[in-house]
Amino acid sequence: ENGIERPTGYNVSFHYNPKVEGHHFGRSHPMKPWRLTLTKQLVLGYGLQYAMDTYVSRPASRQELEIFHGKSYLNFLSSITPENMEQMGDLGRFNFGDDCPVFDGMWDYCRLYAGASFDAAAKLISKQSDIAINWSGGLHHAKKNEASGFCYINDIVLAIQAMLTVESRVLYVDIDVHHGDGVEQAFWSTDRVMTLSYHKFGDFFPGTGAMDETGPESIENPGWKMALNVPLHDGIDDEQYRDLFSEITGAAIETFNPGAIVLQCGADSLGGDRLGKFNLNIRAHGYCIEFVKSKCHNRRLMLVGGGGYTPRNVARAWCHETSVCVGASLKNHIPGHVPYRQAFTGEENGDGLMYPDLANHPSKRHPNLHSKEYLQMMKQNIHTQLRFIQN
Ligand code: TV7
Ligand code: CA
Ligand code: ZN
């Protein structure tokens, strides 16, 4: 507004409501809102707020959530509490249980993370932002009428639906270690959204996302071939992932030519994650964001969070990725004044460094089960699939 150009020429907005931090799934549950507190502290500690617009996001309204979700599911979600759940029933019907527990303030939590995605979408739609970030969102498993895999409301589907009011095509890219099944399913039968997920496949949640899961069977259906899946095994390393990601994502962007891209940046694909089994370092994970950003000179870009179960590394990844968006580089030594800095110190926690070697942690390294041939075959397959939708 004051006429001073920012170095990168990108307007970046950061959407967050600190009230999400007050919600807890339960003591032993792997989803820890604490990772969002740590992320925020790192972002502020590095001073990244001076290079972007930061907004305290508003909670989504029930009417907004109805754009995707069913009314009876929302009735249930908004009225169930730990106190009344015995009498309410229907827990099984809506898939509540250990993964998706009923917890205090659950409805507020859902409205908060979804509201941040709505706000991010609105800034992109009005072109006040080129890149909009919501690290509290990215909850890709939620279905129209069902909770799933720690996800209750699918903020990604809602944000994409909002962007479809101004863009004819939106590409969804998902680097969470789990398959982005909820987003894929929501847009299964349309050619206006292409979905692309990289994930661990084989004896792993949610069990979908095989290579041949490419959209409806029928050539008559507009969604035919619009779902791209890259099933992976344990232990993929930085070089293999970068190579696969740039070739496949690059080809998808070129073929589909989307006006907007939504990138789910689930940090459970990092080495040392409590649930994930990949060997990626922060910079390789962040490379995916750099790569997509480099293809977005004339496209809207939204970044959302997602999984990530080793909080200190989630914070590192998402802070690094925020810096990628604004075009800053961070010094490896985490600033001394960062609150909770001790979460990042000690040999186990990465020696106070922003970029510790996560892949070579002796106790957490996963054997790499990818052959050259497998990776080559995967690329070939995607290229073949994309040839069907060239128009
Ligand atoms: C986006 N893995 C979400 C990823 C969702 C993964 C699962 C757990 C888990 C749940 C717990 C818990 C856990 C140590 C890990 C088949 C089951 C096995 C529940 C115990 N500890 C995202 C969902 C996945 C809950 N679910 O993509 C409470 O691991 O594998 C499953 C299903 C049945 C249910 N049980 C697990 O990253 C945000 N859950 C401890 C306490
Ligand atoms: Ca994924
Ligand atoms: Zn995940």
Image (spheres, helix red, strand yellow):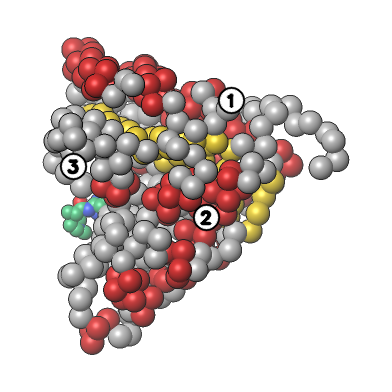
Asked if the residue at label 1 sits under 8 Å from ligand 2, the reply is: no
On the picture, is 276 further left or further right than 11?
A: left
- N-terminal label among 3 and 2: 2
**The image quarter in which residue 62 lies:** bottom left
The disc labelled 2 sits on which kind of residue? Answer: Phe
Residue 122: x and y in percent read 58, 51
Residue name at image x 17 percent, y 70 percent? 92
Mark 3, secondary structure of its residue: loop
Q: Is 87 placed above or below 137 here?
A: below
Please give the label number shown on residue 131. Answer: none
> On the image, numbered disc 1 is attached to which residue?
297
Please give the label number shown on residue 118. Answer: 2
Few, some or many residues within 10 Å of mark 2 (<14, 14–19, 20+):
many
Give me the C-alpha separation between circle 1 and circle 2: 22 Å
Residue 389: x and y in percent read 28, 24
> On the image, numbered disc 3 is attached to which residue?
208
- N-terminal label among 1 and 2: 2
Circle 3 or circle 2, nearest the eye: 2
Residue 50: x and y in percent read 74, 42
On the picture, is 26 further left or further right than 367?
A: right
Few, some or many residues within 10 Å of mark 3 (<14, 14–19, 20+):
some
- CB within 8 Å, label 3 to label 1: no
